[in-house]
């Protein structure tokens, strides 16, 4: 049984500049979305600069259920697509560079005196 309440839960998102992305800030309880917007502005605008605020009723946000979350797991073994798959190259390149510039190599550049 769900009990009806006067207040609804709202999630507040904001962005600092017109070109930045929205970030979740906090949740609040309000009787309607107009009051939620007023409360979000009162909480936020006096503390830091804000370019825009979104107030979203929590019941309109859909998350993934457990079955859907399983689809996020990688089904294939394609680690070469991630940057960590190439971590060994830096070590290999350093070894290659050190082999090229050893003492014998450098001394051979002087040539032979006649």
Image (tube, rainbow, N blue to C red):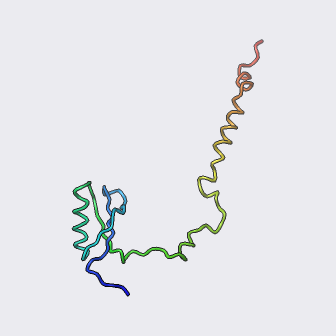
In which quarter of the view is residue 22 placed? bottom left
Q: What percent of the width, then of the height, locates residue 64? A: 48, 74
- Above or below, 108 against 78 in this view is above
Q: Quadrant of the C terminus?
A: top right
The one of 69 and 103 positioned closer to us in this rendering: 69
- Above or below, 17 against 38 in this view is above
Q: What percent of the width, then of the height, locates residue 49? A: 26, 54
Left or right of 107? Residue 57 is left
Instruction: Give the number of marks.
Output: 0
Q: Which residue shows up at 59% across the image and 68% down it?
A: 73
Q: Which residue shows up at 25% across the image and 80% down it?
A: 6
- Above or below, 88 against 100 in this view is below
Furthest-bottom residue in this view = 1
Q: Quadrant of the N terminus?
A: bottom left
The one of 108 and 92 positioned closer to us in this rendering: 92
Q: Which residue shows up at 27% across the image and 77% down it?
A: 7
Q: What percent of the width, then of the height, locates residue 108? A: 74, 23
In which quarter of the view is residue 32 placed? bottom left
The one of 100 and 41 positioned closer to us in this rendering: 41
Q: Which residue shows up at 68% across the image and 33% down it?
A: 98
Left or right of 70? Residue 19 is left
Left or right of 15? Residue 111 is right
């Amino acid at each position: 049984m769900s009990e009806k309440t006067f207040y609804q839960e709202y999630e507040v998102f904001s962005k600092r500049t017109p070109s930045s992305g929205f970030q979740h800030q906090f949740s609040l309880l309000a009787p309607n979305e107009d009051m939620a917007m007023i409360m979000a502005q009162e909480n936020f605008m006096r503390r830091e600069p804000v370019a825009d605020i979104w107030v979203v009723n929590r019941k309109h946000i859909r998350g993934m259920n457990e079955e859907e979350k399983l689809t996020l797991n990688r089904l294939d073994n394609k680690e070469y697509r991630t940057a960590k798959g190439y971590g060994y190259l830096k070590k290999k390149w350093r070894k290659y560079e050190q082999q090229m510039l050893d003492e014998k190599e450098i001394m051979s550049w002087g040539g032979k005196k006649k």
